[in-house]
């Protein structure tokens, strides 16, 4: 990567769509020169907005550059770029990455269709085995910043999902005794194969801002936040209604989702 072009980087960060529309008029070598002088996260934002035909041509000449972006860019931005690359090329790029954990996250994304919950899983929660002493878990939690790590998941010895840890109950208890399975909240997980359009109407979102995601064998893949799920729905909807403004589309989506959630809640109260 050459020296960062701060002017281009600032404009591209604020207006990635407009920047991509201008950039696509150039030759592949020109596109490569400009993108290589952007920070990885910004380069990915722009590259993911290039037409599919240009992305394919660009890959044929500058596959190493794309591999470098996937290695260095924030995980969510890199996943967005993967969504614009033909699947067979994605697998080759991902398998070439040196970072084992990043490679695992990308392969997890590629395993599920883009319209499914599994493709949105990026949050890896804290995991505790069900039979670990609660006292030990409490000591571990006091050593880390639970505000930034997300909810804690309790699993069985085979890695199967059991529930979310009730952190408040654990902290508030006068005498913390027994295994951590005694401090659970029975939160129903989402299945990775579930379509985003269906998952967003899950009544659990009325109570929780984050839900665990499991595979077909009930192993914990990670989790997804309510905000990320809503954002994915908004992007899919705006893709079908490009003429609508962002705020208008978001408002309609939120009203639709709220209506579905309230309808389900009302049905349960009757």
Image (cartoon, rainbow, N blue to C red):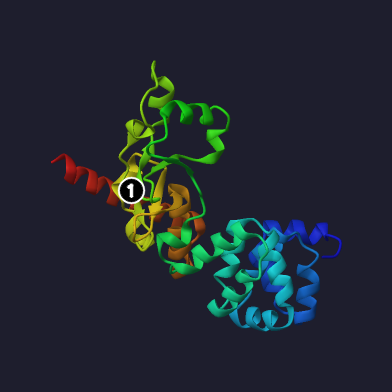
Image coordinates for residue 57, horizontal then vertical, percent:
67, 84
Image coordinates for residue 120, horizontal then vertical, percent:
47, 58
In the rendered image of this protein, does residue 234 appear above or below residue 59? above
Compared across the picture, whether 260 is left or right of 224 comes to left
Instruction: Please identify the quarter of the rendering in which residue 21 is found.
Output: bottom right
Q: Which residue is mark 1?
A: 258
Residue at the limit of the structure toward the left, as seen here: 270
Residue 69 visible in the snapshot: yes
Compared across the picture, whether 143 is left or right of 119 comes to right
Image coordinates for residue 85, horizontal then vertical, percent:
58, 75
In the rendered image of this protein, does residue 202 appear above or below residue 92? above
Compared across the picture, whether 82 is left or right of 249 comes to right
Few, some or many C-alpha atoms within 10 Å of disc 1 (few <14, some 14-19, many ≥20)? Answer: some
Residue 242 visible in the snapshot: no
Viewer-proximal residue among 115 and 222: 222
What is the quadrant of the N terminus in the image?
Answer: bottom right
Viewer-proximal residue among 182 and 259: 182
Q: What residue is rendered at 55% in x and 64% in y?
A: 106
């Amino acid at each position: 990567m050459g020296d960062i072009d701060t002017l281009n980087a600032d404009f591209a960060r604020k207006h990635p769509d407009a920047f991509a529309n201008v950039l696509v008029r150039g030759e592949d070598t020109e596109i490569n020169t400009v993108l290589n002088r952007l920070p990885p996260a910004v380069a990915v934002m722009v590259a993911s907005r290039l037409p599919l035909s240009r992305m394919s041509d660009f890959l044929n000449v500058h596959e190493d550059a794309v591999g470098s972006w996937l290695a260095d860019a924030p995980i969510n931005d890199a996943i967005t770029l993967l969504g614009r690359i033909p699947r067979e090329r994605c697998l080759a790029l991902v398998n070439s990455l040196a970072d084992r954990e990043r490679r695992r996250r990308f392969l997890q994304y590629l395993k599920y269709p883009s319209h499914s919950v599994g493709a949105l899983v990026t949050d890896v929660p804290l995991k505790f085995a069900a039979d670990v002493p609660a006292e030990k878990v409490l000591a571990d939690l006091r050593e880390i910043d639970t505000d930034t790590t997300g909810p804690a998941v309790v699993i069985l010895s085979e890695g199967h999902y059991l529930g979310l840890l009730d952190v408040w109950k654990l902290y508030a208890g006068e005498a913390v005794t027994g295994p951590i399975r005694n401090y659970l909240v029975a939160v129903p997980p989402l299945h990775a194969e579930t379509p985003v359009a269906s998952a967003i109407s899950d009544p659990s979102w009325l109570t929780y801002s984050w839900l665990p995601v499991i595979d077909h064998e009930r192993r914990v893949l990670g989790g997804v936040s309510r905000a990320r799920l809503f954002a994915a729905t908004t992007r899919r909807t705006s893709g079908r209604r490009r003429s609508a403004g962002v705020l208008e589309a978001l408002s309609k989506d939120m009203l639709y989702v709220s209506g579905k959630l309230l309808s389900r809640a009302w049905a349960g109260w009757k």
